[in-house]
Image: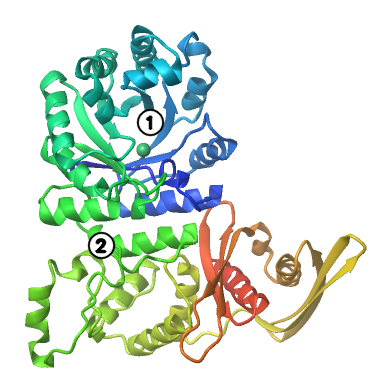
């Protein structure tokens, strides 16, 4: 299926520039895999010229197979006064070995003169040289016209000249950027139309949300003929964020009838949104349009018999189409079908007639009520389903543990001992670590590796802690999310407890048990 409108995700680059966001390399890989599985055709992975973490991301990504997505490396036009082939920043773009390279360059004379300190002609040369060089190396080249909208408003002819410089050099697409995020939909429409009138190359749109119009401006660009939209999941990004793809995707698909993603993708939109928030360690915004918990929550009593009919009159779409649900009466049926879908995705054979389904559903509801979240911890969810479905004993049980922390002058020493039971055999090990959780992890792993050598390759790649709001009558609880890897696959597990060590141990034990389940 060829999309009418291409979705270009920059959560990992522009999005990661948002306040409070700090993705590790393993976070970025997990998000990239999720976006690919969702069906996003372009994933901008980062800017290799700006930081070593992004170089590492592209190195790791070379070993991954993406089904739907093409990876893009992001960078800038060559530096002033330097031959393009001698520019280290441009060279790093080639070394990222991505099929797509996106470069940004200056449209606005204010920036050319005062920020770059270049002449208008020098800037045109920088754009043309860089595009041509990357095209000569076989790349699909996308040109992000930074301040495209503001630059055009200031000097339309020069703005057009910069875009034409990219076009003449063979660029595949010119993307108009509302970098400062302050433009209005009518301005975006007018300038997109003008660009289309003067260029033969495809046009894309990249907007920011500084005045709350990020998604509206993207829609205006598309209505005026742009065929690619760049944005981020949940609208992450500099200042108030980028155009929110979590809004734009369903607007395109459901309101404008534009083909943009595989048919099955939309129903997973809410899950994708929650997943990315979990990885970023943000609470999911309940008032987020489309995918928020409150997006289809109805307050106020209505007659039960009238409910189905009345809901339609108060909802702009059926929330199930984007994987959300209405909240007044969470229908048992919707819950069931979600679990069946998820379980099948995780490799279990389950349908509406499976007798264990009811127990699985009520167990998950109880865990969620207790503060568990499974969007980024599918491995823990798989264990819950397996336990009920297969009536199997877990491969090991933790009989007991002890953690101590002491300080000798300036050195703090953490020690943990763990007692595990495997097939009637007890193993007791002690280990040290840089912190209590690390010591516990070392001890647990040392005990289990004797029985299960395949656990040697498992590494803890990330560890996140969140304090969950206390609900009526209970104290605050701690949720721990752990990411693990065995060099081939990454998976997430979760633990919840009043005590952070207990919560961590649950997530650690789940991580190892999940690896054993995968054989
Ligand atoms: Zn941007």
Cα distance in 3D space between marks 2 and 1 = 33 Å
Q: What residue would you read off at disc 1?
A: 99
The residue at which mark 2 appears reads as 289
349 relative to 490, above or below: below
Mark 2–mark 1 contact, CB under 8 Å?
no
Residue 145, image x, y percentages: 31, 26
Quarter holding residue 132: top left
Q: Quadrant of the C terminus?
A: bottom right
Foreground tag (2 vs 1): 2
Residue at left offset 13%, top offset 57%? 254
**Taking 482 as reference, is 187 left or right?**
left
Q: Residue at x 30, y 40 (%)?
A: 181
The local crowd at label 2, few if under 14, some if 14 to 19, many if 20 or more residues have their Cα within 10 Å, is some
Q: Foreground residue, 442 or 306?
A: 306
In the rendered view, tell whether residue 95 sits above or below residue 187: above
What is the secondary structure assignment of the residue under circle 2?
loop
Where is residue 273? Give x, y as percent. Answer: 35, 60
For the point 23% across and 24% down, the residue is 152
């Amino acid at each position: 299926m060829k999309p009418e409108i291409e979705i270009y995700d920059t959560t990992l680059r522009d999005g990661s520039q948002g306040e409070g966001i700090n993705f590790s390399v393993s976070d970025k890989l997990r998000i990239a895999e999720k976006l690919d599985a969702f069906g996003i055709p372009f994933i901008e992975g980062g800017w290799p010229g700006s930081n070593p973490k992004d170089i590492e991301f592209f190195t790791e990504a070379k070993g991954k197979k993406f089904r739907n997505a093409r990876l893009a490396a992001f960078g800038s036009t060559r530096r002033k006064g330097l031959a393009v082939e001698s520019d280290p920043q441009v060279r790093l773009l080639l070394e990222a070995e991505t099929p797509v390279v996106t470069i940004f360059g200056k449209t606005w004379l204010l920036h050319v003169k005062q920020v770059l300190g270049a002449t208008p002609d020098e800037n045109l040369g920088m754009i043309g040289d860089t595009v041509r060089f990357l095209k000569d190396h076989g790349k699909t080249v996308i040109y992000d016209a930074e301040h495209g909208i503001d630059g055009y408003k200031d000097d339309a002819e020069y703005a057009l000249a910069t875009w034409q410089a990219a076009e003449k050099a063979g660029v595949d697409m010119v993307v108009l950027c509302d970098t400062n995020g302050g433009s209005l939909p009518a301005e975006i429409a007018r300038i997109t139309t003008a660009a289309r009138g003067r260029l033969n190359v495809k046009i894309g749109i990249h907007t920011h949300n500084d005045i709350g119009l990020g998604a509206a401006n993207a829609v205006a660009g598309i209505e005026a003929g742009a065929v690619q939209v760049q944005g981020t999941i949940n609208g992450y990004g500099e200042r108030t964020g980028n155009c929110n793809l979590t809004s734009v995707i369903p607007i395109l698909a459901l309101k404008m009838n534009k083909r943009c993603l595989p048919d099955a993708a939309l129903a997973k939109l809410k899950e994708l949104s929650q997943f990315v928030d979990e990885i970023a360690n943000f609470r999911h915004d309940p008032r987020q349009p489309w995918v928020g918990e409150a997006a289809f929550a109805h307050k106020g009593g209505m007659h039960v018999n009238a409910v189905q009919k009345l809901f339609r009159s108060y909802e702009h779409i059926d929330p199930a189409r984007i994987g959300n649900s209405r909240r007044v009466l969470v229908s048992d049926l919707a819950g069931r079908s979600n679990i069946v879908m998820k379980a099948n995705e995780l490799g279990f054979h389950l349908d509406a007639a499976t007798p264990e389904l009811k127990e699985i559903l009520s167990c998950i509801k109880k865990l969620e009520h207790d503060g568990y979240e499974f969007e980024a911890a599918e491995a823990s969810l798989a264990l819950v389903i397996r336990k009920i479905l297969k009536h199997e004993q877990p491969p090991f049980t933790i009989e007991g543990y002890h953690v101590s922390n002491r300080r000798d002058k300036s050195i703090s020493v953490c020690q943990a001992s763990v007692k595990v039971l495997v097939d009637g055999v007890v193993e007791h090990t002690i280990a040290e670590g840089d912190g209590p959780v690390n010591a516990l992890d070392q001890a647990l792993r040392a005990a289990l590796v004797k029985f299960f050598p395949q656990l040697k390759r498992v590494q803890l790649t990330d560890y996140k802690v969140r304090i969950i709001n206390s609900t009526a009558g209970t104290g605050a609880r701690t949720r721990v999310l752990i990411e693990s890897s065995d060099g081939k696959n990454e998976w997430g597990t979760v633990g919840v407890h009043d005590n952070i060590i207990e919560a961590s141990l649950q997530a650690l034990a789940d991580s190892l048990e999940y690896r054993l389940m995968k054989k």
